[in-house]
Amino acid sequence: MESNVRLFGGTSSKALAEKIAAAYGSTLGNVNCIRFSDGEVQVSFEESVRGQSVFLIQSTDPPAENLMELLLMIDAAKRASAKEIIAVLPYFGYARQDRKDQPRVAIGSKLVADMLAVAGATRVMTMDLHADQIQGFFNVPVDHLYASTIFMPYIQSLNLDNLTIAAPDMGGSKRANAYAKYLKCDIVICYKQRTKANVVDNITAIGDIEGKNVILIDDLIDTGGTLCKAADMMMEKGALSVRAICTHGLLSGKAHENIENSKLTELIITDTIPAKKQSSKIRALSVADLFAMVIKNVHSNESISSHFIV
């Protein structure tokens, strides 16, 4: 590892950070996170970062303390005279709040983008944002990685006949189309109706799924309600099998129960968010090698586009 590069991992992403550091050819730096009895967080670096390029690895999945811890790490690095501070967020939390879809609501992703920059981040690296345009919320450079680089080889290794890519909703059609175009297969789009968040009232498919091996593509899975209903509906309509590929496995609430009881053959996620429970239907692929390679390229001012498939 270059002598002027330091990698640090936050509490929620320590395991992934260690994998990234190992793939980079280094070990994690020593950062101490103290929690007072009331829950307040204090962060300190136990080694000098003066004049260094500091990469801080922390996903901002719930609880909100994960985001606060990252902000404090950034502030500590700034006050310790780091040359540049790159916030590496394998999962960028609050990305679903990217617009005012009803009156008097916050745009959470813009707020978080501002907080990261104000804290002192000079660059942000993340993966599969809920919407690509969130990059425009930042006033610092953003390296937006795509998990398709990892998922595509896995899909090809399945050797599925009559493969069809499906978007679980209209908003995911662009992502699904990119996969379908690369794999030279058909695409299906699901149309869902919901009255409140995480509750799907009705779902149907636009396109032919009879006799097909379907793979649903999405950026994240939370409770799993949409994907599981989509899988059950597709099997009822004659699909041979239904799999789901989602970059970020939030898997909250009854997600594991929903997945186990659904007709999904398997769910493939990444390790951007640490697994809370194990399941026979869930397979996690690591993003560590990809992040390590991109970190090397970013530090050496080389192009990162060669690491993207779609």
Image (cartoon, rainbow, N blue to C red):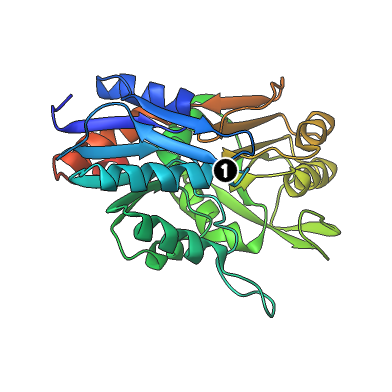
**Pointer 1 local density, CA inside 10 Å: few below 14, some 14–19, many at least 20:** some
Which quadrant, please, contains the N terminus? top left
Q: Report the label total.
A: 1
Comparing 302 with 104, the one in front is 104
Q: Is residue 174 left or right of residue 260?
A: left
Comparing 89 with 236, the one in front is 89
Q: Is residue 11 visible?
A: no
Q: Is residue 161 left or right of residue 181?
A: right
- Who's the residue at 34% across and 35% down the image? 291
Q: Is residue 217 left or right of residue 261?
A: left
| Residue 68 percent across, percent down from the top left | 51, 47
- Who's the residue at 71% across and 22% down the image? 279
| Residue 163 percent across, percent down from the top left | 59, 39
Q: Is residue 15 visible?
A: yes
In this rendering, the answer to whether 100 lies above or below 73 is below
| Residue 49 percent across, percent down from the top left | 22, 35
Using the rendered view, name the quadrant where residue 27 is placed: top left
- Who's the residue at 47% across and 23% down the image? 15
Q: Is residue 177 left or right of residue 169?
A: left
In this rendering, the answer to whether 95 lies above or below 279 is below
Comparing 56 with 132, the one in front is 56
Using the rendered view, name the quadrant where residue 276 is placed: top right
In this rendering, the answer to whether 143 lies above or below 255 is below
Report helix, strand or loop for mark 1.
Answer: helix
Taking the view exactly as shown, the residue that stands out farthest to the front is 37
Residue picked out by circle 1: 65
| Residue 21 percent across, percent down from the top left | 32, 24
Amino acid type for the residue under numbered disc 1 = Glu
